[in-house]
Amino acid sequence: MPRISTVIYSIKQGIKSLKRNRMFSVASIATMTACLFLFGIFYFLLSNLSHAIKNAETNVGVTVFFEEGISDAQIIAIGEEITLRAEVAYITFVSAEEAWERYKETSLNPEQIASFGEDNPLENSASYEVYLSDVSMQEVLVRYITSLEGVRQVNDSQEVANALNMVNRIVSIMTTIITGILIAVAVFLISTTISTGVSTRKQELSIMKLIGATDFFIKAPFFVEGLLLGMFGAILPLLGLYGIYHKIADFVSEKYASVFGTGMSLLGSAHVFARLIPICFAIGIGIGVLGTWLTLNRQLKKLN
Amino acid sequence: MAARYDLEGQLKKDIDAPVILFENVSKEYQQGTPALKNINIEIRKGEFVFIVGSSGSGKSTLIKLMLKEVKPTSGKIYVAGKQLSRLKRWNVSKYRRKLGVVFQDFRLLPDRTVFENVAFAQRVIETPTRKIQKDTPRMLALVGLSEKMKSYPKELSGGEQQRVALARALVNNPVILLADEPTGNLDPKNSWEIMRLLEEINRRGTTVVVVTHNREIVDEMQKRVITVRNGIIVSDQKGGYAYAKNQYSNI
């Protein structure tokens, strides 16, 4: 274990070095801030999107129609069989009358309704609406239900499910690529900062080596430097992101509340930041330490 | 060798044990030109030894080998009871604490005071702060710089800077003091001050090895002189540079 005085010394030296290489320190922190800021924006998108997809999933259903002349008992039996499936969240029965009422309400004007008189054109259109707990299982379920006796037709919403999954995947890939590039740039800049630090302190370091400083003693201040760069590089974007997320959330709930009803709102900031804060710190500190580690041994070997 | 006594009149122990031993040591740098050829040196505890030779003779390589800054191409080197080729990389720092080193260009840290420069040597080996506060002023008093503790190196004369470097080299009580051209940048008066200090340090029991080409000093001090020329030891005796040079002038 290093002495407390050594730890204090290392921290002091690390801070001193940060100040001495002000230009590079600022550049590293700025790059890391940009990197994590963009990452944060994509994270907002991604987490809200997957939130929206989860919501949408529960609204995506499969409609099951029956063959003509089927008995009520048979309908109940089919319902029971469907309910038994693991991927099914819940199931509701829509009678022919209900279906007609709904259709009248949503799609027809009073004149058109009057033209049908007392007839129910959807007489054979009683149905089950089946809601899934996992949209990706939709295809399997549809195949199963189609195979049941007494089922005439199954309408699915595979396209909606596919579209949602596609958007999700594209955003994930973009986040990964952009963050990856920015992380590489940040690691490179931190390496440069550290190697500049080594060369400006060349004399001191070679004296240290000559008078018997341990590797730990020589390296610790540089790791402190990298760590601090990483921490600043994480704190700054987080502050910015926090402000922006609130602005966006307010904007969205104001602007779109009336259009989409209550359905359209962003995830709560507490929920988002509970994850984003540790992720940003882990990336920031990781970049700082990795950048230092990558360059330090190489640079110190050059000394002797 | 006659028994020697230190300041307190006590017999110096292990006076005959070699603290530096080179056995058939050769060193070739990458270009292929040999810097040292088949060197054998034995330096005993408490000795004061000059290593002389013109520039490029290989004498600085000897210091580098002792510090384990470079490895010999062949042969064995023992310093302070360690065989250097067997020393693991992570033990080099501990080994170097047994040696004090001073250089021609002093190598002080310009942004730190005299006190901090000396204390730095202790800080680096994790000496407790309380001990640093005690040892550093004591060492600066020994080299006569108590008054200049708060000065920066650039405010000192060359001789004073070298004395700071000496205090730094000695503060951790090294077994051996290696001095690489310690008077190379100094006028005669300051050079003699440094040499007197080195003699005093030697009298207190530290083995002192001085690499130099200051003929006047070597002649005057009448210590053991090892003469290196073209990577070979051409003379190793007590006396002066002139003596060694005359005897081997035809080599």
Image: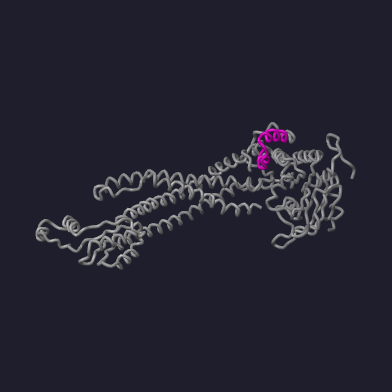
**Camera-nearest residue between A65 and A178:** A65
Residue at 75%, 46% (x, y): give it.
B178
Q: Is residue A5 above or below residue B83?
A: above
Which residue lies most toward the front here? A73
User: For this view, does A33 lie left or right of residue A91?
Assistant: right
Residue at 38%, 53% (x, y): give it.
A46
Asked if residue B135 lies in the magenta stretch, the reply is yes
**Camera-nearest residue between B182 and B96:** B96
State the colouring used for the structure image. one colour
Q: Is residue A75 above or below residue A208?
A: below
Count of marks placed on residues: 0
**Camera-nearest residue between A68 and A73:** A73
Question: In the rendered image, which quarter contains the C terminus of chain B?
Answer: bottom right
Segment tinted magenta in the rendering: B119-140
Which residue lies most toward the right here? B2
Asked if residue B182 lies in the magenta stretch, the reply is no
Percent across and percent down for residue B129 are 66, 35
Which quarter of the picture shows residue A136?
bottom left
Q: Is residue B41 above or below residue A137?
A: above
Which secondary structure type mostly characterizes the magenta part of the structure?
A: helix
Which quarter of the picture shows residue A49?
bottom left
Question: In the rendered image, which quarter contains the N terminus of chain B?
Answer: top right
User: For this view, does B244 lie left or right of residue A255?
Assistant: right
Which quarter of the picture shows residue A122?
bottom left
Percent across and percent down for residue A5 are 62, 38
Q: Is residue B149 visible?
A: yes
User: For this view, does A218 lie left or right of residue A261?
Assistant: right
Q: Is residue B230 visible?
A: no
Percent across and percent down for residue A132 are 33, 58
Percent across and percent down for residue A53 are 34, 55
